[in-house]
Amino acid sequence: MNEPVSEIILSAQDVAKRFDTQAGMLELFREINLEIRRGETIAITGPSGAGKSTLLSLLAGLDLASDGSIAIAGQNTHTLDEKARAELRSRHISFVFQTFHLLPELNALENVVLPLEIRGTTQATDRAREWLQQVGLGARLDHYPAELSGGEQQRVAIARAFASAPDLLFADEPTGNLDEHTGEAIIEQLFQLNTDQNTTLVLITHDNHLASRCDRRLHLHNGKLQEWPQ
């Protein structure tokens, strides 16, 4: 008996991105085609300036492509206005960034609670507390970002990302500001939660070891996205 085909959670067809510059039109990339299935782990690698973060913004519906189309959970982002794209992101997507993006005036618990309350999640405080405990910060709920180490701040960011039960988690160099030991612990946490929650994980990374751990590795270079054999 054949296994059921996994649901395609994100697809990109013939995507291009261009910018007007003083020197003329700059085409960052073109003819990007991609399908990502629910529960996959994907690494996007490439040299600095190749457009990896820009591609992430397009795939996540934060920006619009110059050409082509991108669909998140079956919805074409090009047919939606900004409000509808924001609602689509709220329902399906979370982010983990290199610089944590925590609000300094809120403690760890409040940083996780706030986006849940904005989404109208019931029992947001209980859910936030559970996720902080799951990432090992149950004793640090009342601490502010300045009172937490870099690794602890990134764990708050991970708890915030997973607390909303996203279908897609985009992580842009999530260990870039961490030492090797702490970064490895953070990556273990991300992959474990990906497995436990069946969340699709899309990583931008310069770390070849990290990229090799993903189900698929995509390399962006000279305007083209190519899949590398594992």
Image (cartoon, rainbow, N blue to C red):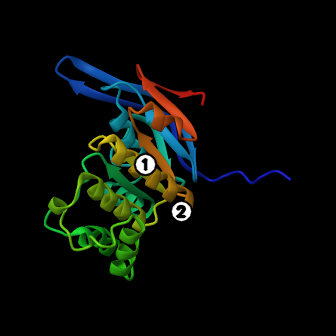
Identify the residue shown where x is 42% and y is 44%.
Answer: 59
Identify the residue shown where x is 45% and y is 31%.
Answer: 208
Identify the residue shown where x is 50% and y is 48%.
Answer: 71
Q: Nearer the viewer, residue 146 or 158?
A: 146
Asked if one can make out residue 89 in the rendered structure from this viewpoint, the answer is yes
Q: Is residue 206 left or right of residue 202?
A: left
**Vertically, is 137 above or below 174?**
below
- Residue that numbered label 1 is attached to: 187
- Residue that numbered label 2 is attached to: 197
User: Callout 1: 10 Å neighbours few (<14), some, many (20+)?
Assistant: some
Mark 2 vs mark 1: which is more N-terminal? 1
Q: What is the count of numbered marks?
A: 2
Q: Is residue 79 left or right of residue 62?
A: right
**Vertically, is 45 above or below 102?**
above
Query: Residue extending furthest front?
Result: 181
Quadrant for residue 132, please give it. bottom left
Query: Residue extending furthest right?
Result: 1
Q: Is residue 159 left or right of residue 42?
A: left
Q: Nearer the viewer, residue 139 or 90?
A: 139
Q: Nearer the viewer, residue 181 or 213?
A: 181
User: Callout 2: 10 Å neighbours few (<14), some, many (20+)?
Assistant: some
Q: Amino acid at mark 1?
A: Ile
In the rendered image, which quarter contains the C terminus? top right
- Percent x, y of residue 121: 38, 77
Quadrant for residue 45, please give it. top left
